């Protein structure tokens, strides 16, 4: 389990990451709500459909990352942060510093 100083640093990193992800998600959702304007040219409409598909995939990935960050912050509040969800052993400090939202020790990654 990380010491208080490390926990404090990791909390700040997670909160910063949460703010960054929330801003990215908001900007993608705003763009998604706008109806695209294009002519009946097949190539143009195909391009728009491809871009919409890419944006939706990115939005899903960002939402998953946000869920991981929120789960890590909730574990900090509950006092269970830094424990592997598979074996229950402490996750190494170096791994937590590299990946603050990780749920697994290196053996179960």
Image (tube, rainbow, N blue to C red):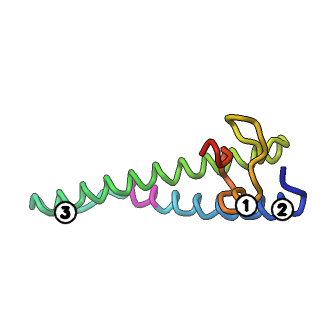
- The residue located at (31%, 52%) in the rendering is 53
The correct choice, above or below, for 99 with respect to 73 in the image is below
Tell me the crowding category of disc 1: few under 14, some 14 to 19, or many 20 or more residues within 10 angstroms, Cα based: few
Label 3: state its secondary structure: loop
Q: Which residue is mark 1?
A: 94
- The residue located at (77%, 57%) in the rendering is 93
**Mark 2 → mark 1, Cα distance in angstroms:** 10 Å
Dominant SS of magenta comes to helix
Q: Which residue is mark 3?
A: 38
Q: Which residue is mark 2?
A: 6
Instruction: Indicate which disc, 3 or 2, sits on the residue closer to the N terminus.
Output: 2
Tag in front: 2 or 1: 1
Label 1: state its secondary structure: helix
x then y, percent, for residue 32: 39, 55
Tag in front: 3 or 1: 1
Residue at the far front in the pictured view: 107
For the residue pair 9 and 94, the one nearer the viewer reads as: 94
Instruction: Indicate which disc, 3 or 1, sits on the residue closer to the N terminus.
Output: 3
**Mark 3 → mark 1, Cα distance in angstroms:** 50 Å
Magenta extent: 28-33
């Amino acid at each position: 389990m990380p010491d208080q100083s490390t926990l404090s640093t990791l909390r700040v990193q997670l909160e910063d990451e949460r703010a960054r992800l929330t801003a990215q998600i908001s900007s993608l959702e705003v763009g998604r709500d706008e109806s695209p304007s294009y002519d009946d040219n097949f190539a143009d409409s195909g391009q728009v459909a491809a871009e919409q598909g890419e944006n939706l995939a990115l939005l899903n990935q960002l939402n998953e990352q946000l869920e991981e960050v929120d789960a890590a912050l909730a574990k900090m509040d509950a006092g269970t942060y830094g424990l592997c969800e598979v074996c229950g052993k402490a996750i190494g400090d170096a791994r937590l510093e590299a990946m603050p939202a990780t749920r697994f020790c290196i053996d179960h990654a």
